[in-house]
Image (tube, grey):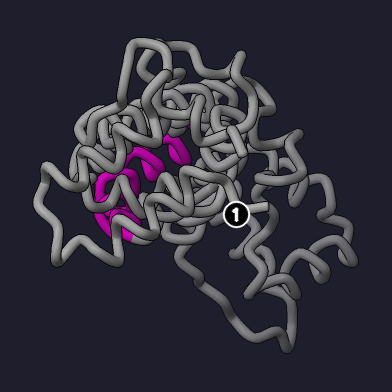
Amino acid sequence: MKKLLYTSFIAVALGASACTVTDIQRTVDGVLAGTTGGPVTQTEVASGLKQALEVGIKNGANQASQTDGFYKNSLIRIPFPKDVQRVENTLRQVGLGNEVDKFILTLNRGAEDAARSAVPIFVSAIKQMTIADAWAILKGDRDAATQYLKRTTSQQLYNAFNPVMVKSLEKTNATKHYADLVNQYNKIPLVQKINPDLDDYATQKAIDGLFILVAQEEAEIRENPIARTTELLRRVFTKENQS
């Protein structure tokens, strides 16, 4: 059964062109009256969603930045680059499996290290969300806010996060291990030489992993009252979860 709040928001969206801000607010007030602290305003909805994303970002980044946060999480663990999978297979066949494993470990360590710097980059992007965006997100899927952030800010996040990731890969020696592996592979007779962009691959995979964690956090906030750690989150998401 569709949630009452979702139905009301659809009606508001369809009639927005013919309604004043006062009319829209009256509709919202009618739906949300009785929520702790009184009706939720349009501004509070937008602020609440931004706050939910910030909570998700902080929790997700904190989880990812722990030792093995990437490496031992099967959902976000960064594997050997898929487009050069043959390199891994060939290296293992010639007895360099330990070196491959060392590279994969340091690659994920780089992502874990970079995750510590992700929060301000993501939060800066979140601040661009408008009230109109908030309406669409609140009546959307349980990861709608995360998908909005991913859809509208991925390139900006990539540009900001890439230098951080590059430094982390160097810090954990992942870049060196990968260069050593590629050099050893390229020395094998008759193989097709490779020189893929590790920095680009690692940056994109790390961002993808963080988005997965943020989506989990968003779903938790939407569905679990205990996860709503502030009064604003409780006000915005309480009625959303009532049918």
- From the image, which quarter does the C terminus lie in? top right
Highlighted range, magenta: 152-171
- The location of residue 41, given as percent across then percent down, is 24, 30
The residue nearer to you, when weighing 35 against 54, is 35
The residue nearer to you, when weighing 101 against 131, is 131
- Please give left or right for residue 227 compared with residue 131 in the image: right
The mark total stands at 1
- Inspect the image, locate mark 1, and give the three-letter code of the amino acid beneath it: Asp
- The location of residue 147, given as percent across then percent down, is 45, 54
Residue position for label 1:
180
What residue is drawn where x is 88% and y is 57%? 95
What residue is drawn where x is 50% and y is 70%? 196
Was residue 153 drawn as part of the magenta stretch in this picture?
yes
Was residue 49 drawn as part of the magenta stretch in this picture?
no
What residue is drawn where x is 34% and y is 28%? 48
Residue 109 showing in the rendered view: no
- The location of residue 174, given as percent across then percent down, is 55, 43
- Please give left or right for residue 36 compared with residue 3 in the image: left
Relative to 223, say whether 148 is above or below: below
Most common secondary structure along the magenta stretch:
helix
